[in-house]
Image (tube, rainbow, N blue to C red):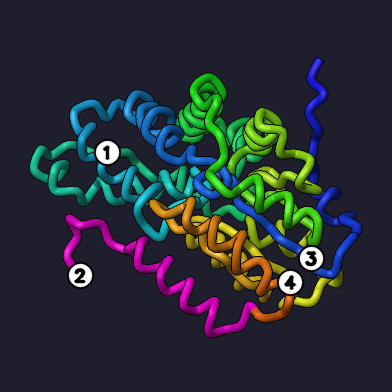
Amino acid sequence: MSTAPHFTRDHLLNLRPRFTSFVGIDSDGCIFPTMEIKQKHCFHSLIISFWKLEPVENALREAAEFVNLHSLHRGQNRFPCLLTTFELLRDHPGVRQTGFQAPSTRALREFCESGLPLGNPALEKRVQETGDPDLQRLLQWSLAVNESVAKTVKNIKPFRWVLESLRDVRAHSDVICVSQTPTEALVREWAEHDLLQYVEVIAGQELGTKSEHLTLATSNRYKPDHVLMMGDAPGDLKAARAVGAHFFPINPGHEESSWERFYHESYGLFLKGQYDERYEAALVEEFKRLLPERPPWVTP
């Protein structure tokens, strides 16, 4: 019988501050170097098999890797990322030249725009209500991804300087994990490396968007300039901006040097109220240069 903690939105709503400062931290690609293996070995391979995209596998992988790893879409919820991947696939030169018909995105787009929490529970309910075969395939794919991740992603240690940073942050700020990964996977991965002790709540996709996580956890509890969001994706920056919080980027491809900077410099400045606009803007500019909007095969 599992003894893993179960987190709900009530855990965010009822968070009791111990400190005057708050830190939200993403997980995949931020705490753990898991983005590449999850995307390439689990997500993308299953997209190919579920939508029978073997004839355009190279184009699909190129589009999916750009969306999920190397663009401003990095770190978003799996369903909008799949929608964007299919849209890029449709116009990919490797697909246009063959005349291959890219998958329909109607049902997927409607789900993404439904306003529902973009997780498997809401999708399963939608399938039961509509009987839509495209949504059924989407659900089966998403469930298969979770199963594949559970089997594949093991023994992947956190980035260097993460543990030192978590210990320091836990001693001076209230901390939660803010992610669009399923909560079950997050709890499993954090527990595997004994990291649950450093956070109050693990908030995954079922608990809402990242900005909703931050809003629920911080509203009327902390001054905006006493709230910091850390992440490796533009969605983390967007969530920080939505609640008026500071943002610290974990730069893709430079994660360990980012954590080292945070541990030795940035967190101290945050605690002292010296994490000012100019300092943060320089970090954000460096971060944005790493994640373009358009793939290399699309001309401006």
Can you identify the residue that label 4 sits on?
A: 271
Instruction: Name which of mark 3 and mark 1 comes first in the sequence.
Output: 1
Q: CA distance from mark 1 to mark 4?
A: 44 Å
Amino acid type indicated by mark 4: Leu
Q: CA distance from mark 4 to mark 2?
A: 42 Å
Can you identify the residue that label 2 sits on?
A: 300
Instruction: Name which of mark 2 and mark 1 comes first in the sequence.
Output: 1
Residue 33 vertical position relative to residue 252 in the rendered view, above or below:
above
- Residue 187 in view, yes or no: yes
Which of 264/114 is in front?
264
Residue 9 vertical position relative to residue 227 in the rendered view, above or below:
above
Q: Are marks 2 and 1 in contact (CB under 8 Å)?
A: no
Residue 238 percent coordinates (x, y): 55, 67
- Residue 208 in view, yes or no: no
What label sits on residue 218 in the rendered view? 3
Amino acid type indicated by mark 3: Thr
Instruction: Name which of mark 1 and mark 4 comes first in the sequence.
Output: 1
Residue appearing at x 46%, y 43% in the figure = 107
Looking at the rendering, the stretch of residues picked out in magenta corresponds to 275-300
10 Å neighbourhood of mark 4: few (<14), some, or many (≥20)? some
Residue appearing at x 39%, y 51% in the figure = 253
**Residue 62 highlighted magenta (yes or no):** no
Q: Are marks 3 and 1 in contact (CB under 8 Å)?
A: no
Instruction: Name which of mark 3 and mark 2 comes first in the sequence.
Output: 3
What label sits on residue 60 in the rendered view? 1
